[in-house]
Structure formats: C-alpha cells, structure tokens
Amino acid sequence: MEKLSDESLSILLLTSDLLYRKTKDKEQKPFTPSEWNKFASLLRNSSYATPGSLYDKNEDDLIKELLISKPLAKRVCTLMKYAAVMAIEVEKLSGMGIWIATRGDRNYPQRVKQLLKEQSPPFFYGAGDGEVLRSSAVGFVGSRDADSKSIEFTKRTVRKVIDEGASIVSGGAKGIDLTSQNEALSYGGKVVAFVHSELDILLRKKEMRKSIVEGQLVLLSAVHPSATFKGFNAMARNKYIYTHSRGTVVAASGTKGGTWEGANENLKHSWVPLIVRDSENIPEGNRKLLEMGAFNRLVIPYSDESHHSIIDLLKNSTTVETKMQVKQAPKKDMDLFYTVWPTIQTLTKQNYSFSELCQILNILPSQLESWLERGNQKVADDEERLLEQPSLF
C-alpha cells in the first residue's frame, strides 16, 4: 500500500470530512467540491502551484499571492494546521486495508478524471490492488429486480468480456450490478466496484476480503467509509461506472430510476458507448434507449444471441465518436485566446505572481483566470489525448 504523499495529504486537509465527521468542529469543515475547484484554480495560476506549498504559509501570504479574502485565507490556514491529526486518521484507515488516492495519485481512476474533469471527486477511498484500475474495463448496469433472461444475458456477456481480456466495472448494488461482479469473480476475472456507502462494512465480508487479497477486486468510494446510503451519492456513483469503463452494457432498464437516469446522462455527455440488450420482451427502458440509437451512434444494440466481440464494437464506436468530436470542434480564427495564450505561457514561466501578470497584460483578474483555465485545459488535452496522466489536482 503506497504511503500518502504530503501533496495528497494537503488535498485531504482541505476537502475531506475525515476530521469534521468525528468532531463536528466548524473550523474543521472542509471545502465543498465547487469551493475546492475554485480555490484549486487559484493555486494552479499562482506561484504556489499546488496545495502542498501551503503548509508553511500564513494568512497574509495567501491574501497577497492569491488575492483572496481574509476569511478564506484564515479558513485555509486553519484546515492546514491539522496535518498531524489527519495523518493519524489516514493511518487508521490503512490499518483497515483502505487507501486514499487524490486526483494526482497513481491509483486515482484516470478516465474518471479525464472525462469528468472538475466534476470528478477530489479523492477516492479504495481497497485492493490498484493495478486493476489500469486495465481496460467494461461497465454493467441494470435494474435491481431484473428478470431471469436479463440475468443470464449479463452472465454470458461478462464471461465474453473477460475472455477478451477486459475487467468489469460494477456499482455493487443488488441485481445486475452484483450479478456481473459475482460472475466475473467466479469466472476468474477482475472487477472494479464503485460503491456509494458503507465501504467499511463490505470489507468485513469474508468473500470480499478473499477477492481483494487474491487481486481480483478493487472497491472504490467517493464518500467516507462509514457513510450510510444517500440517494445523491448513489446517482453520483453512476458517473464513475460509465467514465471508468470503455463502454457500458445496459442489461435491463425501466424508464425511471438510477439505471435509466445514468444511461441518459451518459448519452447527454457522450462519455462512452452504450451497449443495450436487444431481444424479445426486453424492459421498456431498453426499448427506448434503442430507439435513441437511431439518432445517437453511441447506442449499440446487442442481442442475446450475438457473437460479436464487445471490445471490437467499443473500438469502432469510439472511433466514430472521436471523428464526430473533431468535426464539431470550434473554429479558432475569431477566438482571441489563441492569439494571447502563447504570450501568457511565456510570462508564467518567468515566476510572475497572478497580480503581476494582471498588471503586465493590463487585464482584469477574472479575464486572466479564464484564460489560464482554458490554457491549462488546452495543455492537458494536448498532452493527454491518449489518456496519459492528467494534471495533478
């Protein structure tokens, strides 16, 4: 189990509820995801660059360099002073077999970060061999009360995916999720399960521990290991199943509930191809998703009798998706950003502070922040087009 870096610890201090959950002390209340994204943007565009540089900074330092309010500077400094206490809490989790991966860590799901960008959680709690996260994976989603034909379809398709060398992504819920997970494990495959609650309870189950020890299973959660079920966490978990996968199989869906909402959200954002079970007497949700396929090439029908390679279907669909995205790329001719960005890049390498850059370029801080954010994203997109490691946090 990798030791948590000082950089990652600083992110936990600002974003994790590990301490606040126990003490309910208001001064230990972490940043919300939106608050964190705004503050992280300020850091990236300053000489501090990363949260790890904040350990030895005082309020005046932060106000001067980041141009933030005194209350915000005080809040940051207050949270950072609990480093020793946070390290102890992290060590306790490690004793339970739980590690933590922030956005810049090797065990953070890279596709999740690339596709969700700032909507990806600042960190995941995890258990298991992180190497499993670096293999191609196919997701499986479906109703909790799926019929027997959908269950059998899921089992057959899971075995087919494993035979093709991919792992399985599951949500760990009753029904199709657990069917795909259990079938993969019993067939000798590997599984990444994004759970929405009670990670600590799952780790007490003998069969879970066995699969983790044998290197077959990785459990991930964006919420505290002892957090109980909440609907919004379950819905957020769906995003991670789709974005970690190269494509996701919808075995059985109604027209309401998490499976339906998740599939539609995936199509709305064009994250990954959707392989939808297409046979007689399929659920109404499957039927409606297949109808959408007439207008959306990310929807792939897949019958009970199909012998097509899942991986080949995903590769072909991804190629189409990429071509469509290239055709829809915005024209640069009239966008001033592409004229100004090379100059900004040059100046940022000369260690000017954020405020000094505003003065040199004679622009408002909001305009500079916008261009820096776009520039950072452009650099990330250029360097990570083949899903290589994204920016730190």
Image: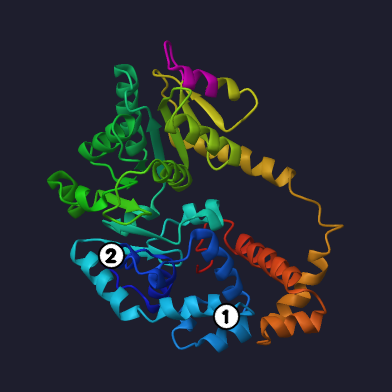
Three-letter residue code for mark 2? Lys
How crowded pointer 1 is (Cα within 10 Å; few <14, some 14-19, many 20+) is rated as few
Residue hosting label 2: 22
- The answer to whether any part of residue 309 appears in the image is no
For the residues labelled 2 and 1, the Cα–Cα distance comes to 27 Å
Task: State whether residue 66 is above or below residue 244.
Answer: below
At 29% from the left and 18% from the top, the residue drawn is 148
Residue that numbered label 1 is attached to: 70
Where residue 302 appears, as percent x and y from the top left, is 46, 23
Residue 63 occupies which quadrant of the picture?
bottom right
Magenta region, residue range: 278-289
Q: Nearer the viewer, residue 103 or 362?
A: 362
Left or right, 127 with reference to 139 = left
* Marks 2 and 1, the one that precedes in the sequence: 2
Does 280 lie within the magenta span? yes
Q: Is residue 105 magenta?
A: no
Q: What's the amino acid at mark 1?
A: Lys
